[in-house]
Image (cartoon, helix red, strand yellow):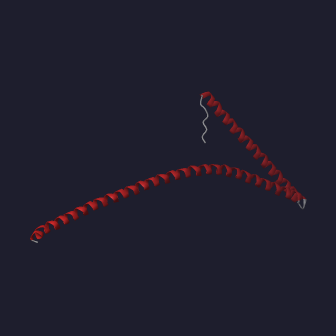
Amino acid sequence: MTDFFGVAPWLVLTATVTWIGQAFLYRKDWVKMELDHKEKVEVSRDDLAIELLSSARAEVVTARAEMESLRDEMKALRSMEQHFYHFQQALDHLAAVLFAKDDLEKSTAERNARAFLSRMARLQQAKGTIANEVQRMDSGLKESEKRSGMREVKFN
C-alpha cells in the first residue's frame, strides 16, 4: 500500500497534466473549427453579394431597355393624344357652324373654324419643314462621313 501512496500523487499529477493538455487541444480544435466556420460564412456571404450585384446589374440593364421602349410608346401616345385633341376641336367647330342659331353666331363660328383650319395648315407646314431639315442634316452627316472615310456605328 505504501507503494500505492508513493505512485498515487504521480498518477494524479499525470492525469491532471493530461486533462489540461486535452483541454488545450480541444480548445485549439474548437478555435480552428470556429475560424473555419467564420471563413465559410464570409466566403458564402461574398458569393451571395457577388450574385446579388450581378442580378442587380442585369435588372438595371433590362429596366433601361424597357424604359427606352416605354419612351417610344409614350412619344407615340402623346402624338395620338394631340391628334385626338385636334379631332375634338374640329368636331366642336363643325358643331358650332352647323348648329348656329343666328347669323352673328354663324359668322363667329365660321371665323373660328377658318382660324382653326389655318392653325392646322401652319402646323402641318411646320412639321414638313422640320422633317425636311432633319433629312437635310442626316444626308449632310452621311456625306461628311463618306468624305472622311468613317463608317456609321449603330449601338443597340
Q: Quadrant of the N terminus?
A: bottom left
User: In the image, is residue 60 above or below residue 4?
Assistant: above
Q: Position of residue 43 (x, y in %)?
A: 41, 54
Taking depth in this image into account, of 94 and 108 the one nearest to the observer is: 94
At x 56% / y 52%, what residue is drawn? 59
At x 49% / y 52%, what residue is drawn? 51
Q: Position of residue 130 (x, y in %)?
A: 71, 41
Q: Quadrant of residue 154?
A: top right
Taking depth in this image into account, of 24 and 148 the one nearest to the observer is: 24
Please count the marks in the image. 0
Q: Quadrant of residue 22?
A: bottom left
Extreme residue in the left direction:
2
> Is residue 19 left or right of 112 when viewed as pictured?
left
User: In the image, is residue 106 above or below residue 147?
Assistant: below
Q: Quadrant of the C terminus?
A: top right
At x 37% / y 55%, what residue is drawn? 39
Taking depth in this image into account, of 63 and 26 the one nearest to the observer is: 26
Q: Position of residue 124 (x, y in %)?
A: 76, 45
Q: Position of residue 81 (x, y in %)?
A: 73, 54
Extreme residue in the bottom direction:
1
At x 76% / y 52%, what residue is drawn? 83
User: In the image, is residue 135 above or below residue 76?
Assistant: above
Extreme residue in the front direction:
1
> Is residue 36 left or right of 136 when viewed as pictured?
left
